[in-house]
């Protein structure tokens, strides 16, 4: 399918793993040059970067900005424009989780989650806006969560950050609408990535359950389909949003959660 995206350039934060990696692969397959970002083993990151460049036939670069550091984030956005000549699409995806009752929640974890899951999207967006305004077009897509719409116990920082991302998404949408720039949030239910695998163990501890019980009674119990959300279901929505067909979808919080938040 041709989404009309060939030659465009995207920055995808947190794209060395999980959802971000899948979204970067989906954009590259549609002809979009990519700046990858995220942590991991440098050799593996370089292998993945080179493989994506080869299979998709688009330029792929890597920038290791730490999403808790405003100056590194600004440098990453400048790097995208300098290396690849433009910036059409920004996908704010980097995110971490910590599961704990509020009274035991480590202060450093709270600060880290708010920085990575919320403030980093402010820093990328503020740096990308002048480039997109000058081009008269742009697409910003925030990977929020079902937890941008509803809460779960023991995830105070994550739920607060994701509700914050919902507010940032709507505000950016209103500010940028007349400049041909849209800002939307994708709100997935559970997707089987390293972030969720780690949560299964942590939730088991917090709730006094076995990992199997958590999977069945907590995780998949939340999703009426009783199935994890698949990567291609998120990539399909992203490609629509960033294409010309998505031009009138703006400020939307789009659930991809098997019906979780319908209840
Ligand atoms: P993941 O753990 O597989 O990937 C997270 C990515 O973020 C990795 O590339 C990691 O290196 C990067 N990252 C973490 N800290 C960083 C930092 N300080 N600077 C730069 N990069 C950093 O997680 P995932 O499940 O793919 O989650 C991706 C996004 O989707 C997150 O925002 C998450 O909240 C959201 N989400 C996930 C699920 C799910 O079920 N997996 C559901 C809803 C929303």
Image: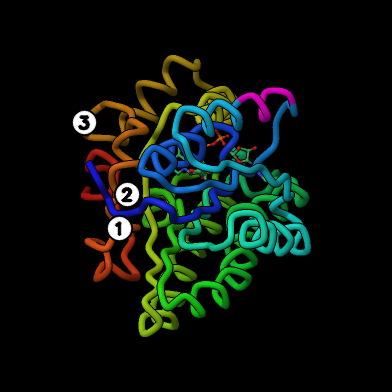
Q: In the structure shown, which secondary structural element does the residue marked by tag 3 occupy?
A: loop
Q: Secondary structure at mark 1?
A: loop
**Element marked by disc 2:** helix
Residue occupying the point 41% across, 72% down: 137
User: Image quarter for residue 119?
Assistant: bottom right
Rate crowding at label 1 as few (under 14), some (14 to 19) or many (20 or more) other CA atoms within 10 Å: some
Instruction: Judge: label 2 CB < 8 Å from ligand 1.
Output: no
Residue 46 among those drawn in magenta: yes
Disc nearest the viewer among 3 and 1: 1
Query: Residue 208: x and y, percent?
Result: 54, 23
Residue tagged 1:
243
Rendered view: 63 above or below 52: below
Q: CA distance from mark 1 to mark 2?
A: 6 Å
Label 2: how many residues lie within 10 Å, few (<14), some (14-19) or many (20+)? many
Does the magenta portion include 240? no
The CA span between labels 3 and 2 is: 23 Å
Above or below 121: residue 20: above
Q: CA distance from mark 3 to mark 1?
A: 28 Å
Quarter of the figure with residue 128: bottom right
Location of the N terminus (image quadrant): top left
Q: Which residue is mark 2?
A: 239
Image location of residue 65, percent across then percent down: 73, 50
Could you tell me if the residues under marks 1 and 2 are in contact, i.e. CB atoms within 8 Å? yes
Seen at 46% across and 35% down, the residue is: 57
Nearest to N terminus: mark 3 or mark 2 = 3
Compared with 196, 215 (above or below) is above
- Magenta-tinted stretch: 43-47
Q: Going by the image, does 136 lie left or right of 206?
A: left
């Amino acid at each position: 399918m041709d989404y009309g995206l060939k030659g465009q350039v995207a920055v995808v934060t947190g794209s060395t793993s999980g959802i971000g990696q899948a979204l970067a692969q989906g954009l590259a397959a549609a002809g979009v040059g990519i700046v990858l970002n995220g942590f991991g083993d440098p050799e593996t990151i370089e292998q993945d970067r080179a493989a994506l460049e080869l299979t998709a036939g688009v330029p792929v670069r890597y920038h290791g900005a730490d999403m808790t550091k405003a100056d590194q984030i600004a440098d990453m956005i400048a790097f995208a424009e300098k290396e690849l000549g433009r910036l059409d699409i920004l996908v704010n995806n980097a995110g971490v989780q910590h599961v704990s009752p509020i009274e035991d929640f480590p202060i450093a974890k709270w600060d880290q989650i708010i920085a990575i899951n919320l403030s980093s999207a402010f820093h990328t967006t503020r740096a990308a806006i002048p480039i997109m305004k000058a081009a008269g077009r742009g697409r910003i897509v925030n990977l929020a969560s079902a937890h941008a719409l509803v809460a779960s116990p023991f995830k105070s920082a994550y739920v607060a950050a994701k509700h914050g991302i919902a507010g940032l998404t709507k505000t950016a949408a209103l500010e940028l609408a007349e400049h041909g720039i849209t800002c939307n949030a994708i709100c997935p239910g559970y997707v089987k990535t390293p972030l969720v695998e780690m949560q299964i163990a942590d939730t088991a501890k917090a709730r006094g359950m076995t990992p199997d019980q958590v999977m069945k009674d907590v995780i998949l119990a939340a999703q009426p389909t009783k199935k994890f959300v698949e990567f291609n279901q998120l990539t399909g929505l992203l490609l629509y949003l960033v294409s010309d067909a998505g031009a009138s979808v703006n400020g939307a919080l789009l659930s991809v959660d098997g019906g979780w938040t319908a209840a």
